[in-house]
Amino acid sequence: MSVLEKKPLFYLLVESNNVESFVNINGVKVHQVNSLMGQSKVELPVNNYIHPEKNTFSLGIFAPETGSEYPESARLSVSLVVKPDEDLSVSHKITDIVFDGSETDLVALNGGSGSRQVDPENEFIENSHGNIVIHPLDIEQPEEEMAGPTLTRTVDIPNSLPLWKFFLSDDLPDYFAVSDETYYRHRDELYEEYKKIEDALIEGDVDVIMTMFEERNSETDRAFYLQDGTTAEELIASLKKSLSNPDLKIVRSDNEKFGLIHEPNGKLVALVRSDDGPAIAFNFVDEPGSVRYGLVFRRENGKWIIAR
């Protein structure tokens, strides 16, 4: 059996130099490189967003300064890697996307216009009998003047992870383009879900709201091979710690202080505060800073469910 058939742990390894970008997997933004100058490197666990068969990851390059070209030193690579749960020192690179400011043909740089196959049962080497299919790079040029290209690669990766429920949930609108009536109706519906949590926290009753996080908690346990209930216990402990900290005070706000940020896949939407920060917020009383908890929803048959 290959690592993909056992307990695979998928990661995106993001390495950047002198370029800003965002990184998506299956239409969910998992990282943003915010520094135009300098280097950065991060490894992101993404099992809770991986599809059991076909996966797409992409990077959107921020535009350089108006009227200028990308510097030759601009470079960004996003590698999809997998590790076995029993030995994290072992890492297999499946494929990657590379942007290089000195290159004019990014398709050629990323393997050309044809698909190729790799064999997970033979060190992930290229093999016509391998069941991983790496599709050619797709480049979408922006319509907006201040946006750069989006580089996308689809990979067929049969694996043992379950199908997460958000993949099959209702399609959500583009909240940047939807009518005001729809935007504020959905915003207010999600605020009502948030208010149940806020009211419970004010009363000091964390346990009563855990059913609202059931899907999020159970799917996180399954994604990272945790014992059932581990994520719920960690969330309960964290919320109770924030509530009992005399230096923290929960931030109470009406619905006018909230907004919506949707994921590109049209399946998930976050309820955020006016500063685009997570919805549940505890501010420090005597100093700057806060402790926050995000609320990411999906919708199924008209019902809102906390998914992440």
Image (tube, rainbow, N blue to C red):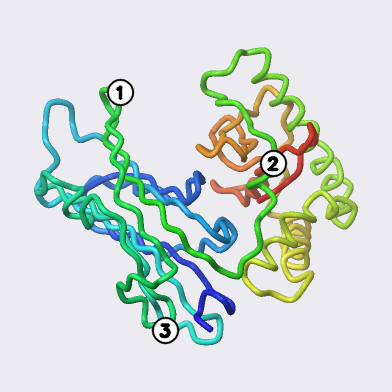
C-alpha distance separating marks 3 and 2: 35 Å
Q: Which residue is mark 3?
A: 90
Across and down, in percent, residue 184 comes to: 68, 19
Classify mark 1: residues with Cα within 10 Å, few (<14), some (14-19) or many (20+): few
> Could you say which disc has been placed on residue 169 in the image?
2
Q: Residue at x 60, y 30 (%)?
A: 260
Judged from the image, the secondary structure of the residue bearing numbered disc 2 is: loop
Amino acid type shown at disc 3: Val
Q: Which residue is mark 1?
A: 143
Q: Nearer the viewer, residue 265 or 5?
A: 5
Classify mark 3: residues with Cα within 10 Å, few (<14), some (14-19) or many (20+): few
Above or below for 194 versus 119: above
Classify mark 2: residues with Cα within 10 Å, few (<14), some (14-19) or many (20+): some
Amino acid type shown at disc 2: Ser
Query: Looking at the image, is mark 1 or mark 2 earlier in the sequence?
Result: 1
Q: Nearer the viewer, residue 115 or 92?
A: 115
Q: Quadrant of residue 206?
A: bottom right
Q: Residue at x 76, y 43 (%)?
A: 305
Above or below for 193 versus 24: above
Q: Nearer the viewer, mark 3 or mark 2?
A: 2
Query: Looking at the image, is mark 3 or mark 1 earlier in the sequence?
Result: 3
Across and down, in percent, residue 269 comes to: 62, 37
